Image (tube, rainbow, N blue to C red):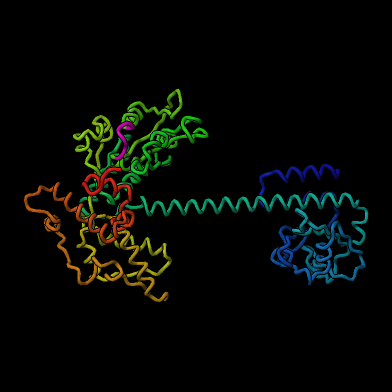
Amino acid sequence: MDKFDIFFEIAVDLNALLTAEDRYARFLQAMRKVIPFDAASLLRLEGDALVPVAIHGLAQDVLGRRFVRTEHPRLDIICSSQGPTRFAPKSPLPDPFDGYLAHDRTAALNIHDCLGCPLIVGGEVVGVLVADAHKPHTFDQLDERFLQTLGALASAAFRTTVLMEKLEHTVERQGLVANELMRQADLENGGRLVGESSLMRALRKEIDVVARSELTVLITGETGTGKEVVARHIHSASRRATKPLIYVNCAALPEALVESELFGHTRGAFTGAVSDRAGKFEVADGGTIFLDEIGELPLNMQAKLLRALQEGEIQRVGADHPLKVNVRVLAATNRNLEDEVAQRKFRSDLYHRLNVYPLHAPPLRDRRDDIPLLVGYFIDMERRGFGIKSPRIEPETLSKLCSYPWPGNVRELKNVISRGLLKAMATTPRENVPVLTAQELGAEFSPEAPVQSVSRKDWACTAPCATNLDLKDAVREFQRRIIGQALQHQQGNWAAAARTLGMHRSNLFHLAQRLGLRSPQ
């Protein structure tokens, strides 16, 4: 075969989608067609040692060896040279592959002709190419320029393979990171609806019924009851499960940017719109959009959202034509939207368009039997995050948790467990199992704190209300008191109070405004 044909064959392999092993092996096979060697090897430089990555005509155990440069002068000379190196048949320097020829391992010295090329990438030696032959003077007729070209191609093959390995490693790592992030998100946001109470069993049954449909679902419930978890379960059990679930917190959207966030905008549509941008509905096309805190959506945007729901059309801000989208809508609120409609704070037509299939996430006080399960779930989840042995919880502490009113619901319980475990870890030697006691959970769970009745009737009586108040007014009065206590405890810091209550700060602001504790700004 012509030398140029070999060069072409090697060049084609450089651009082929091959594994590192295949690329190196094919290079040696192509080289064998123009160089009459009995053995050849490609070795990668790792520190002060050369590690074989491909061999031909050598025993397979060579692949498991490391050839330290100081112990193998021929390899050291090849590494230190700037071009091909030939060793005289009678060279006193030992050949590193003496005794390793695959077909004859009995001879002590059986290499009589040897040449090598350094593999140089970016001016740096990354490895060597070595060829050996039984007969002396086997390589005498090889052109120096041909060997230089072959060495350059070997270097290119090395460089391509190293880059591919790095790319594959990066892609694999990113894939693992993405899987881990998805797993964590699944655990934290939608992994499980924990609980075996009658309310939770009924909720799961309702989810199974509606998930397989395309109906719009309105999820109601107090802050921290797990409305987002319900939404994620609906999506994961639907026919759209392989498509995206896009989360939108309507309470966190600045009013001036709500339309742009939901429907997108074109370049120049407003100050700061430097490029076209897709909105959440466009991104969710084919999948599901979850509109959390839908009750916080401004009235002027409710009409545009209604059009998107009814017609399946959106229009970017600044665009002159609508776009068709295929999106299933799930919405959630902690407000009483019927009251909002009566007060003309929420459009009745949008309410009825959203409330096709209502679901209610029950408060934790109504399913106290689920608290031990939730405690175990959160302890196990936090244990994995902290990397500690399986913690224990004292029975008295669990009783305190079961009797607590939980105004922040499941989210507050999770926060209490997380803080308690962190404190328990700080006071427990690493070799011991942390024990969660009431002291780590907070003052409201201390041994001196009274154990409250777990009945629903007694829960209502814990609210600081007069007997002439109806249930709605009693709940509002209790909310005022809890928020006031949290603010007092945090010296008026709203953000800290929100964290204490297990709420988002903006949600606490809106709730406080409705309760008359904070003036609108």
Q: Position of residue 343 (x, y in %)?
A: 20, 35
Main SS, magenta region, reads helix
Note whether 424 is above or below 119 in the view shown. below
Closer to the camera, 39 or 479?
479
Evaluate whether residue 280 shows in this view. Answer: yes
Residue 161 falls left or right of residue 439: right
* Residue 259 falls in image quadrant: top left
Q: Position of residue 145 (x, y in %)?
A: 89, 50
Q: Reply yes or no: does residue 414 show up in magenta.
A: no
Rendered-image quadrant of the C terminus = top left
Q: Position of residue 263 (x, y in %)?
A: 41, 33
Q: Reply yes or no: does residue 300 show up in magenta.
A: yes
Q: Position of residue 394 (x, y in %)?
A: 27, 71
| Residue range highlighted in magenta | 296-301
Residue depicted at x 29% and y 66%: 441
Residue 353 falls left or right of residue 166: left
Rendered-image quadrant of the N terminus = top right
Residue 252 falls left or right of residue 12: left
* Residue 329 falls in image quadrant: top left
Closer to the camera, 53 or 456?
456
Residue 148 falls left or right of residue 513: right
Closer to the camera, 221 or 287?
221
Residue depicted at x 36% and y 42%: 235
Evaluate whether residue 210 shows in this view. Answer: no
Give the residue at the far left of this rendering: 468
Question: Looking at the image, how many numbered discs can be counted on the residues?
Answer: 0
